[in-house]
Image: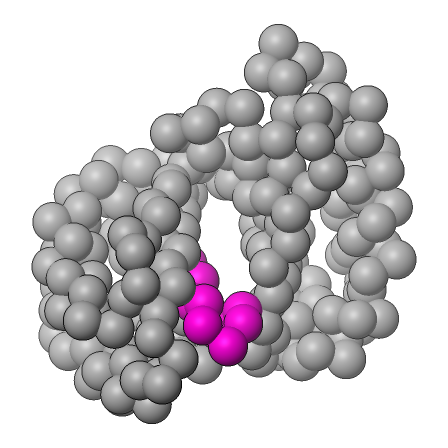
Amino acid sequence: MTRSVRFTSFDFDQSRYDSLLSDVKAIDSDTLNGLSGLLTVRAVKTSENHMFVMSSYESMEALNAASATHAEVFAGFAKYMVGEPIIRSGEVIEAVDGPAPGVGYMRFTRAIFDPSNYDAMMSSLDGQLERLFKEIPGLYRLRVVRIAEAPDRMIAAAAYTDKSAADAARDTAQAALSGMAEYLTEPPFVREGDLVWSYVR
């Protein structure tokens, strides 16, 4: 089985952030424990009015089976949202586990590419990410996900112990992106911020 990820991105009323975070932290753990195949959920505040939530599953089948519960949970946050959330999902296509023991900060990088060059791009990445990221101090985990709803894009989610570790790894991230540059159709888009809540099975 290939591990899969759902990303939920939304703007919120920043004047109600404390209430939003309180409701996020109050999510019933029994509800999450009852979702077969759910591994982790991480909520990251990427700006004063934006939240990025990453949910990891054992497989795409488990992710799809949890869709109704996902919708129900996020319906409870609708009163805090500005506009509609953006929901994307896909299978993990590259993975690196770093030496750090935990995560407190995350960087999400969206890359858009020509799908006809996907195989060539993946071939160019073969082994490169592990070589670049494996021993980075402060790196907890890197996951690259190809988005099912938009096959011309992927999201790289990198988890670090803190912002200083993420900043120190910026040159490494740029080196990885430069290796993909010929396949990208527009500049990468980055969101990053502090981990504000997490669930780990």
Vertically, is 70 above or below 73?
A: above
Q: For residue 136, what is the image quadrant?
A: bottom right
Residue 127 lies in the magenta stretch: no
Vertically, is 111 above or below 10?
A: above
The one nearer the camera, 192 or 38, is 192
The one nearer the camera, 138 or 99, is 138
Q: For residue 165, what is the image quadrant?
A: bottom right
Residue 188 placement, left or right of 104:
right
Vertically, is 170 above or below 167?
A: above
The one nearer the camera, 119 or 110, is 110
Residue 49 lies in the magenta stretch: yes
**Residue 111: image location, x then y, percent:** 64, 37
Q: Residue at x 22, y 40 (%)?
A: 64
Vertically, is 161 above or below 111?
A: below
Is residue 70 visible in the rendered structure shown here? yes
The one nearer the camera, 182 or 200, is 182
Q: Residue at x 69, y 63 (%)?
A: 98
Residue 125 placement, left or right of 6:
right
**Residue 83: image location, x then y, percent:** 30, 56
Q: Principal SS element in the magenta part?
A: strand
- For the C terminus, the quadrant is bottom left
Q: Which residue is drawn at 46% across and 34% down?
A: 147
**Residue 139: image location, x then y, percent:** 70, 67
Is residue 144 visible in the rendered structure shown here? no
Residue 164 placement, left or right of 80:
right
- For the N terminus, the quadrant is top left
Span highlighted in magenta in the image: 44-55
